[in-house]
Image: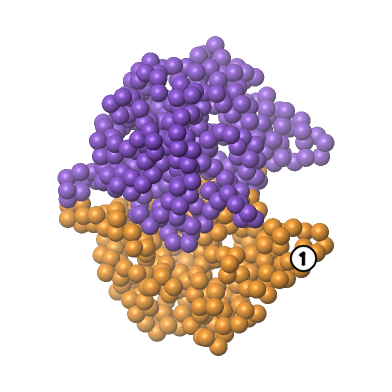
Chain colours: A purple, B orange
């Protein structure tokens, strides 16, 4: 295994954990377990604010989910919007989490895309390891938007030579992804297939020993037909698949996202794992106080279901 | 004037200030005036860290630029990456700035685009005025990426009914904007023109008394030919034009971005105003210690040049 290649690190973790599961950390206050909210408020009796209570509850919630699922999750996908929403306080919580669990793979789902020196700033924000300018939000991979073209991704490339990864949005799981992504080009193929083709091309220099590239793609679980076309256009892409569960994607379609051996795709579960105590596959665990155990059981459930459908990774 | 319509607020400010200038706040440490860097380090002698000195210098720099150009700038465009790069500390500086100058229009240039509840989280992050959940990064408008389609923009719409605006990326100023934005569709027109057409359609309900919509577009100054096609496809769009100056856009092409009366476009200047003491149009002001005066002079220079080319707004 090439430890300087993100895709190899991912495939290695998949094999070691016999898992294709990514756990999505989208901490929403309305859904935070009541037990934690009360405990958080308890902290404020010694002079804290409700803002501090909220922060405490979010951090505690994320930590307990991470610890309960660490041996099943190939990576954690952090939806940065849910932290940014609380401004600098929210980012501070995220910084602490990234720092605390350095041995886990973290994907920051920011869907950023910008140009020139701004794009450089994002690459440094997430990937820069060295010196005084060490990134505060240091992570292993990010998601990025393709609309601005290759030069908007290039600032990430030099970090990709040192074990970092980028997942480029290709076909997203929302209904309006049809508005532009599905538009047919003169060539006859939809825009998202051309995006896949270009990413396959740009990602060649980042193909690891396992045959997958650290320049991957995001394809929503709700579009297995699209996934087949993407897979054909981008055989070396590691594909990150959000949208199974709450968003309507089906486990039985998982093979569409993989190569012919059932490899090369990671499946993200957010609400259906972290809020399993509300939405999870085993109703007997729908108890507020057991949210971490419920998350673990849900992660195990989805891991086994995917392995049953696709074989072990 | 309709004070609940962002486009009207903008046009009103343009008329009042006789200006089409947006000042882009992209504070890059390497370019911070040396005088401020030294002063910032001075602050640390009483026990601060170099991180604190850096923060102090960035905040001081932005404040002095804002104050020096406030009567010329229709709005300030904040490139959030340059704050986020410093993690929670950087966002904290930005929060203070937004809070301090509440009477100015601020556009946060984050180029975000996401789906469902994540998109909701971004809309709240930037636009939510009320109660405990008041946005920390409260601003007047944001930039957004269209690749995810209409439902990714909809969470902003309810705030747009109350004086908020969104500028959707259409044709960006970088060379690789050709990679996907220029692809010809089956219909024969390039993707970015279809984006303009859809945004024109979605923006109808936000057209203000001056005839422009609060759902605007971003078109790079480096592509005046494209701007003419965008203007034809989206006559009601307020167009935000980055890229004049350092990126190579030319003032004499400004009319391409406007309607037939020279109205409806805002021109953003970042480095060529805020770093005018290095790059500005009047070399006699290339002195580190006069950075604020140099910024003001550069802003005046570009305001007059645009008014000479297009008439007063």
Query: Where residue A187 appears, x then y in whole percent?
Result: 17, 48
Q: Residues within 10 Å of mark 1 (few under 14, many from 20)?
A: some
User: Is there any visible trace of residue A224 in the rendered image?
Assistant: yes
Between residue A224 and residue B14, name the one nearer to us. Answer: A224
Query: For this view, does B286 lie left or right of residue A1?
Result: right
Residue A143 falls in image quadrant: top left
Q: Point out residue B200 in the picture as x, y percentages from the top left corner.
A: 32, 56
Q: Position of residue A14 (x, y in %)?
A: 45, 27
* A233 sits to left or right of A108: left
Instruction: Say if B100 sits above or below A186 in the image.
Output: below
Q: Position of residue A190 (x, y in %)?
A: 23, 43
Q: Is residue B148 left or right of residue B280?
A: left
Q: Between residues A285 and B157, which one lies in front from this camera angle? A: A285
* Residue at the image position 57 percent from the left and 75 percent from the top: B69
**Residue designated by label 1:** B43
Report the number of numbered marks. 1
Where residue B221 sits, quadrant-wise, is bottom left
- Front in this rendered view, residue A135 or A241: A135
- Asked which secondary structure carries label 1, the reply is helix
Residue drawn at 40 percent across, 27 percent down? A244
- Residue visible at 25% across and 39% down? A233
Q: Residue at x 68, y 71 (%)?
A: B36
Q: Residue furthest top?
A: A284
Query: Label 1 is found on which chain of the structure?
Result: B
* Depicted B48 relative to depicted A86: above or below: below
């Amino acid at each position: 295994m090439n430890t300087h290649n993100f895709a190899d690190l991912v495939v290695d973790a998949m094999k070691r954990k016999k898992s294709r599961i990514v756990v999505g950390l989208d901490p929403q206050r309305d859904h935070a377990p009541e037990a934690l909210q009360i405990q958080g408020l308890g902290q404020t009796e010694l002079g804290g604010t409700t803002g501090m209570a909220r922060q405490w509850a979010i951090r505690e919630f994320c930590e307990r989910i991470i610890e309960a699922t660490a041996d099943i999750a190939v990576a954690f996908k952090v939806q940065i919007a849910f932290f940014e929403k609380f401004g600098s306080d929210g980012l501070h919580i995220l910084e602490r989490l990234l720092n605390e669990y350095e041995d886990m793979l973290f994907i920051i789902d920011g869907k950023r895309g910008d140009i020139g020196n701004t794009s450089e700033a994002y690459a440094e924000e997430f990937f820069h390891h060295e010196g005084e300018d060490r990134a505060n939000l240091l992570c292993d991979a990010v998601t990025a938007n393709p609309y601005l073209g290759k030069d908007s991704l290039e600032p990430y490339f030099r970090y990709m030579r040192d074990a970092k990864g980028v997942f480029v949005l290709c076909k997203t799981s929302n209904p309006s992804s049809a508005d532009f992504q599905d538009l047919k080009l003169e060539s006859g193929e939809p825009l998202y297939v051309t995006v896949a083709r270009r990413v396959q091309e740009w990602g060649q220099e980042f193909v690891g020993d396992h045959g997958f590239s650290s320049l991957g793609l995001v394809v929503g679980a709700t579009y297995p037909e699209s996934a087949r076309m993407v897979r054909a256009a981008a055989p070396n892409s590691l594909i990150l698949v959000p949208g199974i569960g709450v968003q309507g994607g089906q486990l039985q379609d998982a093979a569409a996202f993989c190569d012919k051996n059932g490899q090369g795709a990671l499946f993200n579960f957010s609400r259906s794992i972290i809020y399993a105590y509300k939405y999870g596959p085993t109703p007997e665990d729908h108890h507020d106080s057991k949210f971490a155990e419920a998350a673990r059981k849900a992660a195990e459930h989805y891991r086994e279901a995917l392995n049953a459908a696709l074989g072990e990774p």
